[in-house]
Amino acid sequence: MCAVTIHSETLTEPKSSGYEPGVNDFAMMVATKNGSGSQTSNEVLIRSLFRMGIPVSGKNLFPSNIKGLPTWYTIRASKDGYIARRATTEVAITFNQDTAAEDVQNLPPGGICILPQEWKWTHSRDDIIYYEVPVKPIIAESNIPKDFQDRIGNMVYVGAVAYLFDIPLDIIEQALLDTFNGKQKPAAMNFGVVQRAYDWSRENLEKKHSLRFEKMDGTKGKLLMTGNEAAALGSLFGGLTVAAWYPITPSTSLIDAVMEHKGIRKDPDTGQDTVAIIQAEDELAAMGMIVGAGWAGARAMTATSGPGISLMAEFAGLAYFAEIPCVIWDVTRIGPSTGLPTRTGQCDLLFLHFLSHGDTRQVVIIPANVAECFEFGWRAFDIAERLQTPVFVMSDLDLGMNLWLSDPYTYPDTPMDRGKTLDKEKLEQFFAERGEWYRYRDYDGDGIPYRTVPGTDHPRAAYFTRGTGHDDRAVYSERSEDWVKNMDRLRRKLENARSFLPQPIIDYDPNKKIGIISYGSNDPAIAEARDRLAAAGIETNYLRIRALPLAHEVHDFVMNHDRVYVVENNFDGQMHQILRMELPQDTTHMISLALGDTLPMTARWIHTQILRQEQE
Amino acid sequence: MANALGLERAEYRGAPSTLCPGCGHDSISNQIISAAYDLSLPMHRVAKFSGIGCSSKTPAYFLGRSHGFNAVHGRMPSVVTGAVTANRDLIALAVSGDGDTGSIGLGQFKHIIRRNVPMVYIIENNGVYGLTKGQFSATADEGQQLKYYGKNELPPIDLCMEAIIGGATFVARSFSGDAKQVQTLLKAAISHKGTAVLDIISPCVTFNNAETSTKSYSYGKANEIPLHEIEFIAGGYVPEREEITIGDYAEGETIAVEMHDGSVIRLKKLGKDHDPRNRLAALSLLEEAQMDQIFLTGLIYYEEPRMTLAETLNLTDTPLTQLPEHKLRPSRETLDELMQRFM
């Protein structure tokens, strides 16, 4: 079997959901207009299910727009803890007239549609259940200040859903408080509408379905959070001191969260800040600032997305070659150029790994869930300072901006690793022991040199940092021997990094002959697909890559299987390409399953693709 | 003779220059060495920066005991911003050129001024690209002729005007051949609390030294009009900063401006009456000078410094890079409390 790249077929997935829905095991889709306040309503529903102990996930498909364009939000409850996106849902809350016809059409037979009564909508299907609620009359009766009326209509469906699917009102009330950060006034105003809609539904709607929610014990000790917020907290616990950034979707909320939480890093003695947050004039400057800060000894970070990475490419090469630690979060979106700024994908992988001209090979670490966003938030600084190189953290829009169920975070288990940085005392000791110190000399054989930072009060601490060719004394050199020697050392450093970077997570049983390799936020879809495949008699092993350059174990995993599926969410099968490049042996048994359809991956797609291949 | 730190002038030198013999840039490097020596600057606290170009090579040629960073073309200001934010005790000395600042780096030039990052921003301005063998830069004179590229039809960008419009609090112009004035302005700039811009006309001996160019030696010597006779009285470098004020002074009078370190610059009004605290007057003066193709030297504009970036950001007085780990990593209890909010 030869390696093939199979592109998306998900956009026309069959109408049947492929799921047997049941109590605490179904999905709802909410269709609204962007800017209508639906984000709040959807968050309240998710938080309510979370508070009921039901594993839940939310996927927001929003437009690149401030107000008016359609937006869809999928809420999935799964008693078994599956939190990947589902392409089809049993329930559609169609509150946007522009898309309602299509939204209704996408429901599976037996599906449920909730819509505003005042539309006087023709029921186009007789195989689904319609529930109509009078949105405008309920708002009119709720005595809402005029300014808020436009944005509160969506609370009506929260009330209807609460009644129709058995969400206790006291839980909705608490979820509203969570959503409004404990602010009583807006929570109470919104709850008034929810209550009225609930009461109206109870008095007027006859339940014709059996789906419902009930309290369970599936979220105890778990968090509900976005990856961007977790990354921000991780960075703050990692000793972030200089953050420079330029606003870009979907990374903006990461820096917003740094600003929101920076209070935990106020100096208790003086009340002053220990974190500088600078909004730069563009991404070139943002990158320049963190390179300057990292050079001076700060733990420096920026957050951006694809177009910003393009602008940072030149500095990324300088930092790689001059060996300056810094951390760059790429919360990826999809596409060349502007692409689709509010859609997800993993299409920056190759670009990040080889970012900048010349022979660059950048370190990339890839979190797969919110807890890892927190961990990589602090660990990235340790890696950057240890290796003296830029560290790219590749998250994505789905992981960064959607609410995810997460295990609690683990407090950093090791002190900060400041790497081979010589302060005045260490430098004196270094001279005493070795009689010399040269910036780029490989004293330990691991390719990692020793550095000093400006401000070190020692007459021999200084060196000249440059992007031009240099010898191991940091002196300008055009000699080809010096050039090659330096490049060899950089290669050695990167080779050693393979066993130092976050190692892959491997689920391996030598009796299974089919392997799956993936990375990042595809993880929940893969877990679910593996269960489905196992149920169909196809047992799989799974390796999740967490860093580039690849760990040595990846090689063994590939070689120990008859077939290996490389599952990823980009169009070109970029990790598959890296694997083929790095594994010298015959790897025709490695099959690329590359999606890149702008949406978070579904278990069904993986399951269908592997099943088809295995049946051939 | 040793300075207050017990250092000889020679100890402030750097590596030998590789620029063309007679290059104006080398004389500026020499003045930087002299100024640093005279002010007894502690070299470990100085950080040298540059972009790309002939001028940007020069930080290797002075203050060899200071860390230096030769960055990428036009982006030196962002590197300075990051470094000085990380360590607010650093004394940032940056050298750029007219291409590095006036073309590719114009955006970052304006923005570092806007943020008032404390630094000395020297532009070694020769109106021409040297390393790529003689293209016009954005500061080249209108109508100027160059050997390969013919006549320049575009008006020049005046970097002092750009700096003043951008909100710079210290803007000066000088001529690399005027060692005394360059050195005096450098000392004042080093003592300034904020972005101090020094545009130094520095003729290119190889590509732009025709007598018709305003950036040639002969033109410079003949057409330089000093605004004030400036005298700088060094008080030894002291970092403590307080606002500098200059009171009214009448035409013909000499006024003394005390810098942050206690040192003093004396401004003497000459024939050309100019009040460096008057922004509009400074701009008109530059406008007139540009029309007449003469350049004025001296302190063109000065104001009491605004808050620096570190102050705006309310950063700890201790440089961020020197904070101990317990101030950089909140406690386990803080994490537990935070997580409770998301449970």
Image (cartoon, coloured by chain):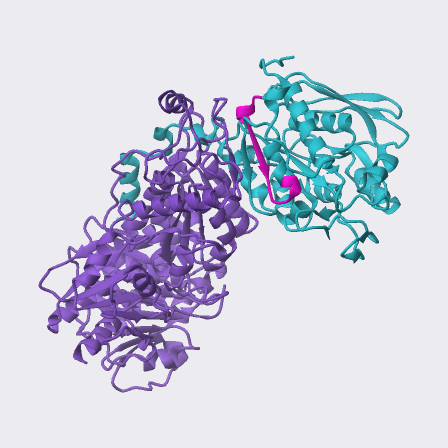
Give the vertical position of B18 relative to A510 (above or below). above
The answer to whether residue A24 of the structure is visible from this angle is no
Name the residue at 46% across, 31% down. Answer: A453
Which of the image's four quarters has the N terminus of chain A? bottom left
- Indicate the position of residue A310 as horizontal and vertical percent values: 49, 57
Residue A492 vs residue B246, the one in the foreground: A492
Q: Which chain is cyan?
A: B
Tell me, yes or no, whether the highlighted magenta stretch contains residue B43: yes
Q: Residue furthest left?
A: A511
- Indicate the position of residue B234 as horizontal and vertical percent values: 69, 18
The answer to whether residue A384 of the structure is visible from this angle is yes
- Indicate the position of residue B156 as horizontal and vertical percent values: 77, 50
Q: Is residue A444 left or right of residue B238?
A: left
Residue A194 vs residue B220, the one in the foreground: B220
- Tell how many labels: 0
Give the vertical position of A509 relative to A590 (above or below). above
Give the vertical position of A540 relative to B143 (above or below). below
Q: Is residue B107 left or right of residue A579?
A: right
Q: Residue A506 falls in which quadrant of the image?
A: bottom left
Q: Residue A25 falls in which quadrant of the image?
A: bottom left
Name the residue at 45% across, 33% down. Answer: A273
Residue A207 vs residue B124, the one in the foreground: B124
- Indicate the position of residue B204 as horizontal and vertical percent values: 75, 42
Query: Which span is picked out in magenta?
Result: B42-56
Which of the image's four quarters has the C terminus of chain A? bottom left
Name the residue at 27% across, 76% down. Answer: A112
Residue A502 vs residue B168, the one in the foreground: A502
Q: Which chain is purple?
A: A
Tell me, yes or no, whether the highlighted magenta stretch contains residue A450: no
